[in-house]
Image (cartoon, grey):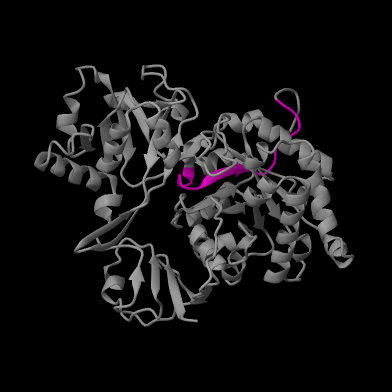
């Protein structure tokens, strides 16, 4: 067996995996879910909550890598929403069984929705212990939250007495069974299970990684048998047993741990370590499936890592690139921002369009704001309105965040770097819906340029029927934006049960798409399209 290793690097934390190469093929099934970190905030003053939010705002969060959610007391929901960075979601700590009306002291799901809250906790161990919430009450609260479009973090856990009596699995399955009895498989997509070993919270007893994995694994196996194999595969089960900067690295490597419920550690600088431990979920799953081992990197500054593959995600990789040895590989090339940054990509496409107008006539008219502001304003009349529709995107965001359609100049914020394009108003539709194609390529060398294209890919579909843009539908994101991160929250989103080749679901196979296209067009036209791609 040959020994190979891979390093995993964030801007602060560096890890390395040790790999044993095997001669037999290994088939991998990767979950599309990403890790989730929940931070409940204890009851406190406006000042203490503001201080905690200040700490959280200093933490760099990439929502395409990890979901970070903060749950303040209900009195502070509005305060936290206003102060917290937009890459962190806000969650309620509780939701009532009742709706709007004369229910003094209760917090209705309708009120949370009105506040713009999309998450709520149900069944937290303190509510079960102090307020006597039964399994049935917690299940009904969760169901009500789901009915109103919220996502629920459903808490379960056993006491020290129950653990000593060997009742852990019985308690966890009993609590989960109450919810499984009243929600559908579709609704499970908006549920996260938070396992709280109550016996390891504030008792002085420390839960080990082995104990955490055992509880998560057995619960997932029970879900696969008694609920649904699909639910078992997709549901996220996060761990809430005194997580801190020291044990997070070990816990996150566990196969059935999909994130953390973080308590007091969130008040400390080590919270940044916890966040970074949850990055690169797909890479970790591949590593586990191939037998790679994650170890700490302690290389001196300016020296190469002792590894074969260096997985890095920092803005400037040139220092690392310069230290690479001949046999080492890295997952980025220097200068990739020229393609990954929207404004730089737009500028490069405009340059190519001027040099090769025939080959680049597929690019819609594009403006980089505020640099092209004067030219862009010529599309609007003296009242700042236009007959054309423009799609505007923030320079550095992803997953559809911050993207909007407009015909009014006043709706475009000043000061931010934005990319504006004339909206393609007559796109090809699939089942009456707008879609896009995601093509995967591998670049192994820039000089000489060597690119491999994957012959399959994804068709990402909107979840609302397309209507030509008008003043009344510009805000309908499920109709205009094809991003999975947007459409997965639609009630019309259809998860694929297979590999996307059967012509159903909101994500489909690229091979299926070209077969579908050949039913509509002559083969030579479809083949020409692929050649152009």
Where the C terminus falls, by quadrant?
A: top left
x and y, in percent, of residue 25 in the image: 52, 66
x then y, percent, for residue 168: 82, 60
* Magenta region, main secondary structure: loop
State which region is magenta: 83-99
Most extreme residue toward the left is 355
Q: Is residue 258 left or right of residue 56?
A: right
Q: Nearer the viewer, residue 216 or 517?
A: 517
Above or below, 204 relative to 162: below
Q: Which residue does the image show at 53% across and 60% down from the upper left?
A: 278
Q: Residue at x 85, y 45 (%)?
A: 132
Position of 71 relative to 317 (above/below): above
Is 90 part of what is drawn in magenta?
Answer: yes
Q: Quadrant of residue 433?
A: top left
How many numbered marks, from 0 up? 0
Q: Can you name the residue that lies furthest to the right here? A: 165
Q: Which residue is most to the front?
A: 523
Residue 259 versus residue 115 in the image, above or below: below
Q: Nearer the viewer, residue 385 or 349?
A: 349
At x 72%, y 22%, the residue is 101
- Residue 109 on the magenta segment: no
Q: Is residue 454 visible?
A: yes
Relative horizontal placement of residue 160, taking residue 471 as reference (left or right): right
Position of 263 with respect to 499 (left or right) is right
Q: For residue 133, say whether it is visible.
A: no
User: Which residue lies at the image location 81% right of the left edge and 58% below the top edge?
Assistant: 169
Q: In the image, 201: left or right of 92?
A: right
Camera-nearest residue between 170 and 207: 170
Q: Position of residue 248 (x, y in %)?
A: 59, 67
Residue 46 percent coordinates (x, y): 57, 47
């Amino acid at each position: 067996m040959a020994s190979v290793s891979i390093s995993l690097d964030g801007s602060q934390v560096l890890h390395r995996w040790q790999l044993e190469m095997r001669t037999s093929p290994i088939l991998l099934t990767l979950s599309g879910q990403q890790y989730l970190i929940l931070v409940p905030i204890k009851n406190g003053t406006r000042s203490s909550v503001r201080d905690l939010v200040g700490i959280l705002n200093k933490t760099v969060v990439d929502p395409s890598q990890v979901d970070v959610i903060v749950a303040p007391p209900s009195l502070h929901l509005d305060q936290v929403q206003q102060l917290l960075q937009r890459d962190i979601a806000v969650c309620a700590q509780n939701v009532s069984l009742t709706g709007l009306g004369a229910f003094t002291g209760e917090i209705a799901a309708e009120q949370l929705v009105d506040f713009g809250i999309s998450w709520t906790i149900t069944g937290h161990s303190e509510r079960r212990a102090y307020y006597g919430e039964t399994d049935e009450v917690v299940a009904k609260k969760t169901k009500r939250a789901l009915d109103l479009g919220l996502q629920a973090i459903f808490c379960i856990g056993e006491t020290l007495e129950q653990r000593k009596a060997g009742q852990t699995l019985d308690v966890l399955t009993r609590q989960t069974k109450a919810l499984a009895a009243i929600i559908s498989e579709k609704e499970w997509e908006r549920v996260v299970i938070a396992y709280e070993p109550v016996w390891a919270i504030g008792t002085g007893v420390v839960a080990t990684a082995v104990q955490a994995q055992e509880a998560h694994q057995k619960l997932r196996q029970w879900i696969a048998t008694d609920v649904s194999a699909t639910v078992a595969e997709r549901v996220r089960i996060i761990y809430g047993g005194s997580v801190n900067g020291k044990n997070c690295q070990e816990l996150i490597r566990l196969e059935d741990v999909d994130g953390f419920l973080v308590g007091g550690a969130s008040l400390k600088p080590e919270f940044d370590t916890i966040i970074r431990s949850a990055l690169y979920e797909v890479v970790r799953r591949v590593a586990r499936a191939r037998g790679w081992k994650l170890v700490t990197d302690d290389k001196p500054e300016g020296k190469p890592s002792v590894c074969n593959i260096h997985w890095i995600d920092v803005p400037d990789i040139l220092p690392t690139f310069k230290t690479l040895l001949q046999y080492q590989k890295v997952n980025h090339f220097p200068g990739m921002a020229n393609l990954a940054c929207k404004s730089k990509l737009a500028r490069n496409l405009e340059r190519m369009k001027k040099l090769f107008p025939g080959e680049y006539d597929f690019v819609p008219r594009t403006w980089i704001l505020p640099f092209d502001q004067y030219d862009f304003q010529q599309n609007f009349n003296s009242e700042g309105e236009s007959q054309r529709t423009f799609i505007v995107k923030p320079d550095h965001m992803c997953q559809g965040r911050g993207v909007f359609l407009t015909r009014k100049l006043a709706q475009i914020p000043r000061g931010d770097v934005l990319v504006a394009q004339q909206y393609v108003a007559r796109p090809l539709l699939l089942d009456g819906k707008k879609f896009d194609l995601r093509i995967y390529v591998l670049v192994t060398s820039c000089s000489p340029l060597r690119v491999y294209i994957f012959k399959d890919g994804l068709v990402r579909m909107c979840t609302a029927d397309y209507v030509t843009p008008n003043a009344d539908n510009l805000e309908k994101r499920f109709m205009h934006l094809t991003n999975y991160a947007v459409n997965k929250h639609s009630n019309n989103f259809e998860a694929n049960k297979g590999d996307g080749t059967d012509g159903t679901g909101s994500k489909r196979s690229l091979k299926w798409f070209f077969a579908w296209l050949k039913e509509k067009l002559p083969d030579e036209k479809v083949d020409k399209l692929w050649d152009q791609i």
